[in-house]
Amino acid sequence: MTSYHQPGVVVTDHRFTVPLDHDDPDGGQLELFGREIVAVGRADDDLPWLLYLEGGPGFGARRLVGRQAWLDRALREYRVLLLDQRGTGASSPLNRQSLAAFADPAAQADHLAKFRADSIVRDCEAVRPRLTGGAPWTVLGQSFGGFCATHYLSTAPEGLREVLITGGLPSLGLHADDVYRAAYPRIARKADAHYDRYPQDVARARRIAAHLAEHRTVLPGGYHLTPEAFQSLGLMLGTADGSHRLHYLLADAFIRAGDRQELSDAFQESALAALSFAGHPLYALLHEACYGGAGGRPTGWAAERVRTEFPRFDALAALEGDDPVLFTGETIHPWHFETDPALRPLRDAAELLAHRADWPALYDPARLAANEVPVAAVVYHDDMYVDTAHSLETARAVRGLRTWVTDEYEHDGLRMGPRVLDRLIGLVRGEI
């Protein structure tokens, strides 16, 4: 263990060894990384633990500094563990480089199948007694982290003192088709709201999409920026400042080069930073697998298939007329594995995962209906990433779960400061 100081906190880096497959503990092993954070002056106190599970899938726990965002509230009473979930951050990370060690795409896909919420929760249960001495801990799950927390409630509630979920109550039994059939209208609302706020961006987005349709555009590093890839910049629109950041990105897209207009280097670099999966490939590889196990059939590139039911998202058709080019977001498509050089080597593995039919179910409705763990969840009123109606249906299915439905924040409300966490702690303890 290594300990050091940041403003107002003591940080200790932990590394743990866990089985790759918890049903085969003598098989391969993984190394997990977690960052313990405690307030200065309280490092030796007997504090309860709070485990933070990041959104994703595919993102390591965010690297907060000092008492940033929600940590300020948590550190008043908890010792916090920011855990990099398996395959992310510094926890045996997976990407095109590490996965190249496998013999073929089938071996890659079999390995990747062990990186869903069920394995993550078993990792947490392996780590917990090493830190808490066996005492249950509080789990704070953001977005996909809330999916993991809901699985935790389904399989190992004895490890939980309280559960706090922010923007991450999953549907319990819906197939991926149903998830994306609900998603596209939400995404369209966010795109329409962006154009209402910035009507000048209608023409700007059309101009960029038309340029991409006519000119093969390869970004630095080899990313192929197609009209569809450009549309996926709409992933920004589900965050508090995302519409504004997208507006600024579109505003200065072109630069004059002699007698012609080109997409500027600055635009290309910014677009690449927003679009590349190099830092989080599991998001693309396992995104639809989050819904695997529902209905007993493959997810089968659900977002791509369902998109055809919503013709407003057809960029080329929009360009043929006068319609705005709608942005997308929160959807993964086969073409992601062609446009992005970080994903291209994993295209065949992704195809095998899309057609996998034997995913175990992640949630146990009967056990959730008998839940005895205090649970509180913030549900964002028109969350682009997680369907509000689905979340509320799940909330009703979990015994004792208390909700706070709000339009004060977007999906990233937890990073805006301590208020969201403060409200949830009060809610889970019956103080509100």
Image (cartoon, helix red, strand yellow):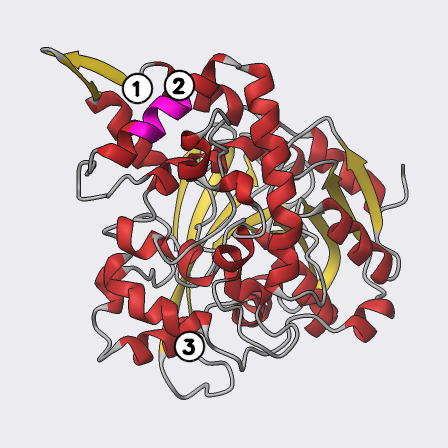
Q: CA distance from mark 1 to mark 2?
A: 8 Å
Three-letter amino acid code at disc 3? Leu
Question: Residue 73, percent across and down?
Answer: 67, 33
Task: Point out the stretch of residues depicted in magenta.
Answer: 205-210
- Cβ–Cβ under 8 Å for marks 2 and 3: no
Q: Is residue 70 visible?
A: no
Marks 3 and 1: which is nearer the front? 1
Disc number for residue 359:
none
In the rendered image, which residue does mark 3 sit on?
20
Q: Nearer the viewer, residue 141 or 387?
A: 387
At horizontal 85% and vertical 46% (from top left) the residue drawn is: 429
- Cβ–Cβ under 8 Å for marks 1 and 2: yes
In the rendered image, which residue does mark 2 sit on?
204
Please tell me whether mark 3 sits on a helix, a strand or a loop. Answer: loop
Q: Of the two numbered discs 2 and 3 on the same chain, state the one appearing first in sequence.
A: 3
Question: Residue 147, percent across and down?
Answer: 63, 58
Three-letter amino acid code at disc 2? Arg
Q: Is residue 69 left or right of residue 301?
A: right
Q: Nearer the viewer, residue 18 or 235?
A: 235
Does the magenta stretch mainly form a helix, a strand or a loop? helix
In the rendered image, which residue does mark 1 sit on?
253
